[in-house]
Image: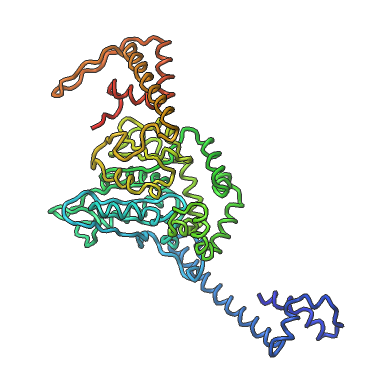
């Protein structure tokens, strides 16, 4: 800073040293300003020395804060800006995630408390419309900001998936501890608390499943909204890269992504002020708080969250054979998690609800998402079609095309039933009081087996009808 000041004053210093005045000296800011400020060069020199002293003081405080973080086993506070950069980060092992409480509007014995986990580039504000509706239904709701996002931006950690899981587990343990005075949790007569309903959206679904795998004793069931489960990771990289330039650069390992995110951190205050206005021009339905928090995160948290979606994602295994009752909520118009592709990757024990919405279902359809979370507590299965949800074939194609598609689905279901009868033979009706006898299958005809596979894989409606007729899939209540 002092060197820059001396550079700006170079023409005056040269002039005082005997160098004749030239016109090129007039472009230097210090030379021009010296003629209009009382005291001239002396005033500017005092200001430069004062600014340099302030910088040295700030640098000393910054180094002290980074040293305190290193002694606590935390990485440096990359991305923390403003006055907070002069203080050490909070240790997440001793500090809870920043979170919102939405108390139930009526108390007493009720459904389990709900915990809502947000996705990548979001915060607790993303879930706020759903949280308010659940509270109106009598459910206490807790909505945390994950490590490195929004209110938890100063919690220092590596932001890997296991770090996020550990932070959520500590929060659940603190809130559900017997004898806790908080409003979180459902307490019985012995003071013990029941499990909670853990809900995750997008990346939050990855965190929710990892928490369930580590501490199932804390949970009652899972609800996964737009879970990022993919059949082909390479195609997903291309799809995400096409929708987000920053995400594409991050996944490719380009250093440009870190530079851009670092710039966003430095400009976080003006960006958060401008974000609502920009978002309203793109979509008037985006809440201002959601738009502000979309740029309120640190680069390591964004990078590690995006990496967790494609590397070491526990959703693939969980959604085939879940250890807890699990419901998946999909968006029919979701361009990130394609509903048809995701449905093919789900096991028979997974309940599925499909809504006519985009990837931002908690904002697009808060009433329907709240209904899906509150439905069938403790049950492994929910109907695939619920009142108020989108039909299997949305009517935006017009009534004629809808009728044709439903007729095709019906014909396909009859064909699937015929193929199933040829492959498996007649199904025996079991006595409810006795254990079912193992099915004896005849050797399938290769050609018919191939036709059956092609028909049921190509059309979700045919596959669902086949499951209902043969008892292979979840049965509606």
Look at the picture and state if 312 lies above or below 67.
above
* x and y, in percent, of residue 394 in the image: 40, 34
Q: In the picture provided, is 9 more to the left or to the right than 80?
A: right
Q: In the picture provided, is 376 more to the left or to the right than 391?
A: left
Relative depth, front residue between 334 and 442: 334
* x and y, in percent, of residue 399 in the image: 41, 30
Assign the N terminus to one quadrant of the image.
bottom right
Look at the picture and state if 473 lies above or below 33.
above
Q: In the picture provided, is 334 more to the left or to the right than 6?
A: left
**Residue in the image at 48% along x and 49% along y:** 304
Relative depth, front residue between 324 and 356: 356
Look at the picture and state if 284 lies above or below 409.
below
- Number of dots carrying numbers: 0
Look at the picture and state if 39 lies above or below 412.
below
Assign the C terminus to one quadrant of the image.
top left
* x and y, in percent, of residue 119 in the image: 42, 49
Q: In the picture provided, is 37 more to the left or to the right than 341?
A: right
**Residue in the image at 53% along x and 57% along y:** 278
* x and y, in percent, of residue 425 in the image: 29, 12
Q: Is residue 73 visible?
A: no
Q: Is residue 358 visible?
A: yes
Relative depth, front residue between 23 and 407: 407
């Amino acid at each position: 800073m002092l060197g820059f000041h001396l550079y700006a004053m170079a023409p005056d210093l040269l002039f005082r040293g005997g160098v004749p005045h030239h016109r090129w000296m007039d472009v230097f800011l210090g030379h021009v300003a010296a003629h209009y400020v009382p005291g001239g060069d002396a005033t500017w020199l005092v200001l430069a020395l004062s600014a340099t002293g302030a910088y040295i003081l700030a640098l000393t405080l910054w180094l002290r804060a980074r040293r305190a973080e290193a002694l606590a086993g935390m990485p440096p506070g990359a991305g923390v800006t403003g006055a907070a950069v002069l203080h050490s980060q909070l240790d997440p092992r001793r500090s809870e995630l920043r979170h919102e409480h939405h108390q139930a509007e009526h108390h007493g014995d009720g459904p389990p408390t709900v915990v809502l986990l947000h996705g990548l580039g979001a915060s607790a504000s993303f879930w706020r419309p759903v949280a308010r509706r659940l509270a109106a239904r009598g459910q206490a709701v807790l909505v945390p900001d994950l490590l490195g996002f929004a209110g938890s931006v100063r919690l220092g950690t590596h932001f890997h998936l296991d770090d996020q899981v550990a932070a959520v587990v500590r929060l659940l343990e603190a809130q559900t501890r017997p004898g806790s005075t908080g409003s979180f949790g459902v307490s019985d007569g012995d003071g013990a608390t029941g499990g909670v309903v853990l809900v995750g959206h997008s990346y939050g679904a990855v965190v929710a499943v990892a928490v369930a795998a580590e501490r199932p004793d804390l949970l009652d069931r899972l609800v996964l909204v737009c879970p990022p489960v993919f059949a082909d990771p390479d195609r997903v990289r291309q799809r995400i890269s096409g929708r987000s330039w920053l995400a594409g650069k991050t996944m490719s390992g380009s250093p440009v992504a870190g530079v851009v995110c670092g710039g966003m951190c430095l400009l976080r205050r003006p960006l958060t002020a401008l974000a609502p206005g920009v978002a309203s021009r793109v979509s008037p339905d985006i809440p201002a708080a959601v738009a502000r928090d979309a740029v309120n995160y640190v680069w390591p948290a964004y990078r590690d969250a995006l990496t967790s979606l494609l590397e070491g994602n526990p959703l693939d295994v969980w959604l085939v054979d879940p250890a807890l009752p699990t419901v998946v909520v999909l968006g029919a118009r979701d361009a990130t998690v394609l509903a048809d592709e995701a449905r093919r990757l789900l096991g028979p024990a997974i309940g599925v609800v499909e809504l006519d919405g985009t990837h931002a279902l908690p904002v697009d359809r808060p009433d329907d998402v709240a209904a899906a979370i509150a439905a069938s507590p403790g049950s492994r299965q929910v109907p695939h079609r619920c009142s108020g949800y989108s039909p299997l074939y949305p009517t935006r194609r017009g009534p004629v095309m809808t009728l044709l598609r439903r007729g095709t689905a019906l014909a396909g279901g009859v064909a699937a039933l015929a193929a199933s009868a040829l492959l498996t033979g007649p199904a025996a009706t079991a006595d409810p009081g006795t254990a079912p006898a193992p099915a004896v299958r005849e050797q399938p005809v290769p050609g018919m087996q191939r036709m059956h596979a092609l028909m049921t894989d190509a059309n979700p409606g045919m596959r669902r009808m086949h499951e209902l007729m043969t008892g292979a899939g979840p049965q509606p209540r």
